[in-house]
Amino acid sequence: MSYGQSSVVREVGVDERRITVTVNGEKRVVEVEPRLLLAHLLREGLALTGTHLGCDTTSCGACTVLVDGTPVKSCTMLAVQADGHEITTVEGLGTPSELDPVQEGFSREHALQCGFCTPGMMLTSHALLESNPDPSEEEVRWAISGNLCRCTGYQNIVKAVLWAAEKKSGGVS
Amino acid sequence: MTAVDEVKIGGMGASRRRVEDARFVRGRGNYVDDIKLPGMLHMEVLRSPLAHATITSIDTSKAWEIPGVRLVLTGEMMAQRNLAWMPTLSYDTQAVLATDKVRFQGQEVCVVIADDPYIAKDGCEAIVVDYEPLPPVVNPLQSRAADAPIIRDDKEGQTDNTCYRWEVGDRAATDRAFATADVVSKLKLHYPRSHPSPIECCGAVADYNPATQKLSVFMTTQAPHIIRAAFALVTELPEHMIRIISPDIGGGFGNKVPVYPGYVAATLASILLGKPVKWIEDKTGNLISTGFGRDMYLDGEMALRSDGKILAVRMHADTDQGAFFSDAQPSKFKIGLMHSAFACYDVGAGHITAQGHYTNKAPGGVAYRCSFRVTEAMFFQERMMQAAAVDLGMDQAEFRRRNLLHDDAFPARTPFGFLVDSGQYGKCLQIGLDAIGYDQFKIDQAEARTRGRRLGIGISTMTEPLGAGNSREYDILGIKMFDSAELRVHMTGKAILRVGAKSQGQGHETTWGQIVAHELGIPAADVIVEEGDTDTAPFGMGTYASRSTPVAGAAIAMVSRKIRAKARKLAAHLLEVSEEDVEWELGRFYVRGAPERGATIQECAMAAYSNMPDGMEPGLENNAYYDPPNLTWPFACYIATVEVDPATGVWDVLRVVAVDDCGVRINPMIVEGQIMGGLTEAYAAASMQFQTYDADGNIVGSNYMDYLLPTAWETPGFELHEVVTPCPHHPLGAKGVGECATVGGPAAFVNAVHDALSDTGVRNIDMPLLPDRVWQAVQDGQDVSGMPPVRSDA
Ligand code: FES
Ligand code: FES
């Protein structure tokens, strides 16, 4: 599979590799150029545009996805490196009818404005709560410090994650 | 039956959860980079590595040979179509693709269009450009030197590097006041160049359809109608055949107002190829070539009476505009609304002079969460206030209290001509002081000092002009600064509202529905809000300078009132009484004296399509263009406390208190979100975020490893308070708010650090207050300037 239009006939000489990735629970077998970034495979190849790209230096975290449950900046991982791994993107959080507590918390606490950092921010938060179900404010701030937000000032994001933690533990309904 | 409950229907004052969130938290937003059209090609930009050079040759032949490359455009090719240069929003010109020279590092030189962006990048790398380097000019002081190279030698009649001169105020009255002063306080500072840097960069998908000859451009723009007008001028396509669509925007902050070369090049490429062309800028491209804010050198003084009364102010500002004067700002005002400085104080007389300078740097200056240079104005104002209080030996709070406009002073004309119309400044300040525990802090501070700890407190109080126009005074390229709304109520009482503003995260889809709910009693959830498509939205000037609620928000109230007026006629018809006997309560008309006999707004809507009185035009829709009588004048008091470690220069924020009076709050949750976002950008400016250039004109701050933005870890917590003084002329009593904290906030942090160093003789450390600057200042007991370096050979 190439990056651009599937209708574009690629010239000879492009060396493609076949990989198998499980994305949001679904097994996908795709052909990719070795230089293709995971972020581009997700966005262009698999049409999962919820994963955003915000920088060129692995700094902003907008592209964060979970690889086998661990937050990874998908702009800095090649698609071929994802071969055999499980990927979760924002589209895999919650179900169509029921939001994940992190998603619900973000909306409830007004933890997003333009929404561009939000998918990465939520996936990082989700991973935090999986490993630490009852984080302190400081632990939340540290956990999301690899994700930049230019709109919110973070305070409501922290509140949202703490709300989600409480919700998950059955504390709020 | 009684009126509907306004809170239940999500009206004014409801912290209604955002409509936008439903798609954003699911990753279902629709940003420019998410748009994919059949047959779409991809564009990349080749940029200049040098700040100033003559282009001697460009060889694109190797790029053309790469399979998948469809087009390579150079300045020469643009020139053949009269598109090598384009007009800017400040009556200057800007190169689209360089022809003769490059004038800043990062300037657009060529573009490559290919089947995918990887191939387009390969194409850029295969282009060979020969440059003859010229000496770069990297700051205004250098640009003024007699032997400085003339950067804009492309402009006829340009004999130096000055791009404008401006002055305002009463020089003679100011001089007279200074002659009587007991004390004259002086201050000189640099507000560094700062990039708004939304996480999403700029981009476009240009789609020219050769069959219909219609051009559609999906674009990251805060002002789609201005772009359409500019495109009609630049491309000579008729305006009705140009459609600009601004989809979801991943933050703007002023960065996405101007017309950028990438938009123009992608559009020409689409016209030439007859295919959609997508251009998505990378972060480096965004940081080194698009609209930044500030970069101003300020030198001023304040005349004072020994009892603390301000008698006059004067100042001079030099602005570094970069290679092109490209700011989006009202035409009359060459340095934006700089002259709003000191608007909240009774300063007697004032005089400001300003000069703009071309340099070999990226063009801009006005963009960045700021109502046209008010950020620099308020920063200088509040730094000057602190310096003056120190010179007088007077308490910071007391000095402000003595000079703030009193509640009975409104409306007040400032020495620079603004009419400040309302406020409760003293009350705001007092709430802030009480919240931070000012008196106790002073005691704690003195006590800590005896143990070698340096605590500091900084105050910043300011009012700023938000919501341009009125149209008498404010226009961009002659287009008056009004705004618009169009409301169509369907027969079942549901509605669609289209607005000329354009949200970039401010939550318009949520807030605008609340205004309709407030005016008509239609639940906010029954109103769909659309913005950003020039084919469907009424003409508006867009969203920047905190103008959406002051101008577009007012237009929404006005169009709703027009709808209500027609609904009243329908109600009279339904109730079989004369219109004069019909009374209104939220969501319902009723017969005077018989409140049980009524017709809901929804019943009136149904009647507009199914049972209108004889002779009445069917339907229930209207539009409104709103030209505000004045700007709105929110007031804020920001107070920060810090502790400085003199051994390292590191300073930590202890507390931040914000008291904002932005008038009536439509959605308090969203308003508070705006304030917290603004405070974070204020902290960023004070502590770490700036762009500078080395002596060769290389930009420092071209990516997120060099251009530091605060993360959740550094960002302090914020304590918010409010005062509500309704705006006297806005139909809802609302004022602008989006940028107050970015404008007023920096001085609170910077004043706090200086307060902590009050016994060291340090009067000014330029922002950002990096640890090494603070450390240096403490070591030497001297000021630290943030002025960029001057080349020794220049
Ligand atoms: S896009 Fe910024 S970290 Fe990946
Ligand atoms: S919500 Fe805009 S960047 Fe975070």
Image (spheres, grey):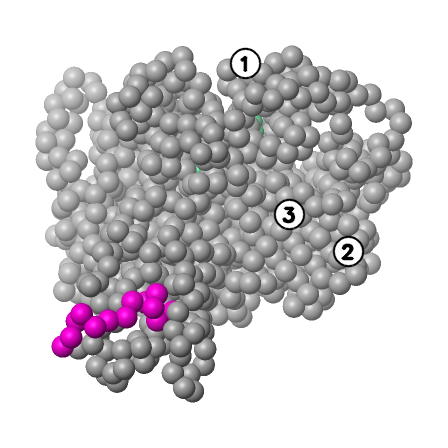
Q: What whole-number distance in Å separates the C-alpha atoms at marks 3 and 1?
A: 34 Å
Helix, strand or loop at label 1? It is: loop
Q: Residue at x 20, y 18 (%)?
A: B452
Q: Is residue B242 left or right of residue B436?
A: right
B590 vs B53: above or below: below
Q: Mark 1 points at which residue?
A: A68
Helix, strand or loop at label 2? It is: helix
Q: Please state which amino acid type lies under the numbered disc 3.
A: Ala
Q: Is residue A124 left or right of residue B514?
A: right
Q: How crowded is mark 1: few (under 14 residues within 10 Å), some or many (20 or more)?
A: some
Q: In this view, does B106 lie to the left or right of B571?
A: right
Whether residue B106 is visible to the viewer of this picture, yes or no, is yes
> In the rendering, at what x and y percent does residue B334 appear?
48, 61
Q: Please state which amino acid type lies under the numbered disc 1.
A: Asp
Which of the two residues, B781 or A170, is positioned nearer the viewer here? Answer: A170
Q: What span is in magenta?
A: B593-605
Residue B264 drawn in magenta? no
Determine which quarter of the picture holds residue B689: top left
Q: Residues within 10 Å of mark 2 (few under 14, many from 20)?
A: many
Q: Please state which amino acid type lies under the numbered disc 2.
A: Ile
Which label is found at residue B271? 2
Whether residue B356 is visible to the viewer of this picture, yes or no, is no
Q: Does the residue labelled 3 lie within 8 Å of ligand 1?
A: no
Q: Mark 3 points at which residue?
A: B204
Determine which quarter of the picture holds residue B314: bottom left
Which of the two residues, A11 or B160, is positioned nearer the viewer here? Answer: A11
